[in-house]
Image: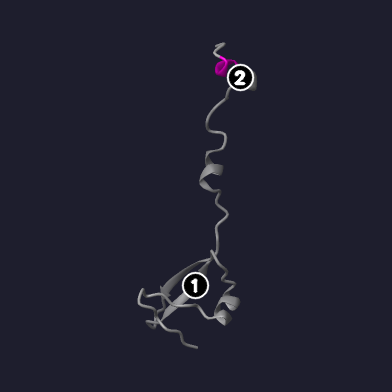
Amino acid sequence: MSTTVTGKGQVTIPKRVRDLLGIEPGSLVDFERAQDGRIVLVKIEKRATPNRLARLRGHAGKGLTTDEIMAMTRGEH
């Protein structure tokens, strides 16, 4: 199966290949060079690493209570 390269260097991955590899919108893919020189399309499996915000969760220290925040907003500190 073949496909045409656009002026921007883009190609459409044929549906049969997407289905075979489980490639969906948002999937990450890579191009690897095989030992015989061929270029191989590989789906990158998403790692179970937490996102940026999840990694920071709990690092701000003990926060203010709701009563303390309300007192600050009223100028009662």
Instruction: Say the numbered circle drawn on residue 70.
Output: 2
Q: Residue shown at 55%/57% (left/top)?
A: 47
At which x and y percent is residue 1? 50, 88
Q: Give the SS element for disc 2.
A: helix
Q: Are marks 2 and 1 in contact (CB under 8 Å)?
A: no
Task: Work out whether mark 2 precedes mark 1 in sequence or the reverse, and give the earlier one.
Answer: 1
Question: Residue 21 colored magenta?
Answer: no
Instruction: Tell me if 63 is positioned left or right of 2 in this view.
Output: right
Task: Say which of marks 2 and 1 sits in front.
Answer: 2
Instruction: Tell me if 48 is positioned left or right of 9 in this view.
Output: right
Q: Give the SS element for disc 1.
A: strand
Instruction: Say the numbered circle drawn on residue 42.
Output: 1
At which x and y percent is residue 38? 40, 82
In depth, the one of 58 and 15 nearer the eye is 15
The residue sitting at the left extreme is 7
| Magenta range | 68-74
